[in-house]
Amino acid sequence: MRKSMFAAAVVAALLAACGGEGGELSRSAPGLQIGGGAGGVASGGQQPSGGGDDAAAKLNTAEGFWVGPASTGFTVSLAVLDNGEAWGVYSSGNQIVGALQGSAKGDGTSLSASGTDYNFQSNSQAGASITGTVAQKASIQARTSTGVTLSLKYSAAYDQPASLGNLAGQYAISGRTFDGYFGVNRLTIDASGAFTLLDRGCTATGNVAPRGSKNIFNLNVAFAGATCLVSGSVAGVVYLDTASRQFVALALNGGRTDGMIVVGSKL
């Protein structure tokens, strides 16, 4: 049974393909490594704690798209949403080698995050925390609980409104879970954001909708069929890079035990 899926994670810009080997997911690897073996930046997607009723108390200065290097040599692409959820990937060139999911909070210049790193190279996952500093819409300097440092810059692409008109069309896609790769390599998203994908006896029916005023789409997909790499339903996010005409989709089931990542290039 294909039950131990890569329980995916975040929105990334400017990445063109998935990579790494499939395999059974181990849940015993220690610490956040960002590609160093196992790890985690984020825990189960819970919203970060906040306080007070005034706007200043509710402001999350970490919200946005962030891209930059980790001390392990990988590039980290991270999205922190308006509710504090964090979704991301880390990559080597055009190869995505791991995913991140959890929560992040910027309180003034102070940054804190917690969650899970899903490492494709070691087929493992583990939780940890991150602390550091954030300059709103500018930069993040942080260190994980296992000593990995991050130096991220803000991407103004986050502030562009999500557009179904820009997203609709036909894509060449590649996708994976920890159990394997999707066989189908074409996907059409219609003007309403709906799509249906047939893959070796598995049917995936989904919908994408703009999340709000930022460049993030909400994603919901239902899988049906005994051959599906993912069972049941998953929900997550999609980021569209209009310059490269590419999207990245990441989604998890309710228990965060199954998930997927799909990268598409518009035809």
Image: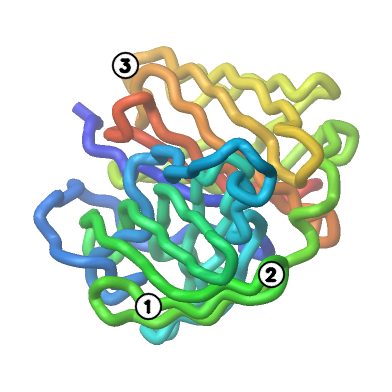
Query: Would residue 213 be seen by someone viewing this image from the given angle?
Result: yes
- Determine which quarter of the picture holds residue 172: top right
The residue tagged 2 is 154
Q: Distance between the Cα atoms at labels 3 and 2?
A: 42 Å
Residue that badge 3 annotates: 226
In the displayed structure, would residue 189 be above or below residue 41? Answer: above
Quickly name the residue at label 1.
143
Residue 92 appears left or right of 53: left
Q: Earlier in the sequence, mark 1 or mark 3?
A: 1
Label 3, secondary structure: give it: loop
Determine the residue positioned at 68% across, 27% down: 208
In the image: residue 197, left or right of residue 256: right
Q: Is residue 202 above or below residue 110?
A: above
Q: Nearer the viewer, residue 108 or 171?
A: 108
Quadrant that contains the N terminus = top left
Which percent across, then down, holds residue 237? Answer: 59, 38
Percent x, y of residue 205: 57, 17
Q: Spatial distance from mark 2 to mark 1, Cα to Cα?
A: 17 Å
